[in-house]
Amino acid sequence: MIKIYREKDSPQADRIEAEFQDILLGYEREVLTPEEAARRFGTIDSLPVITNNEKVVSGDAIPGYVKELQELMRDWQAFQGDWCYVNDLGDVC
């Protein structure tokens, strides 16, 4: 399960959650203080922190990870039906 740990007032975390909602990604949210996050995660860059099972992502790694999740969800949605598809290379089913 994907989980975002964030401060109550965080424009960066608000943007991340908006992206999750745009791609219809299920996730949980937990509000923490920076001190609580340091106790829970040890040395992290800063809040917000995203976890996915054992994977922990924070700081400058977040945009790349969110992009990975967007691509995963796009692929997941593309292959979930019983219809034919054309991918970016023009290949069909």
Image (cartoon, rainbow, N blue to C red):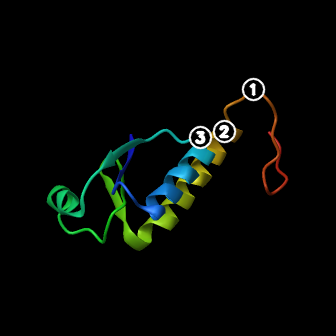
**Mark toward the viewer: 2 or 3:** 3
Mark 1 or mark 3, earlier in chain: 3
Circle number at residue 77: 2
Labelled disc at residue 29: none
Q: Position of residue 27 (x, y in %)?
A: 44, 41
Q: CA distance from mark 2 to mark 3?
A: 10 Å
Instruction: Determine which residue is flagged by label 1.
Output: 82
> Is 3 placed left or right of 90 in the picture?
left
Q: Residue at x 62, y 40 (%)?
A: 76
Quick one: 58 or 90, which is closer to the camera?
58
* Amino acid type, label 3: Leu
* Location of mark 3 (residue): 24
User: Could you tell me if the residues under marks 2 and 3 are in contact, i.e. CB atoms within 8 Å?
Assistant: yes
Q: Residues within 10 Å of mark 3 (few under 14, many from 20)?
A: few
- Residue depicted at 50% across the width and 51% down the height: 17
Q: Callout 1, which amino acid?
A: Asp
Task: State which quarter of the image contains the C terminus.
Answer: top right
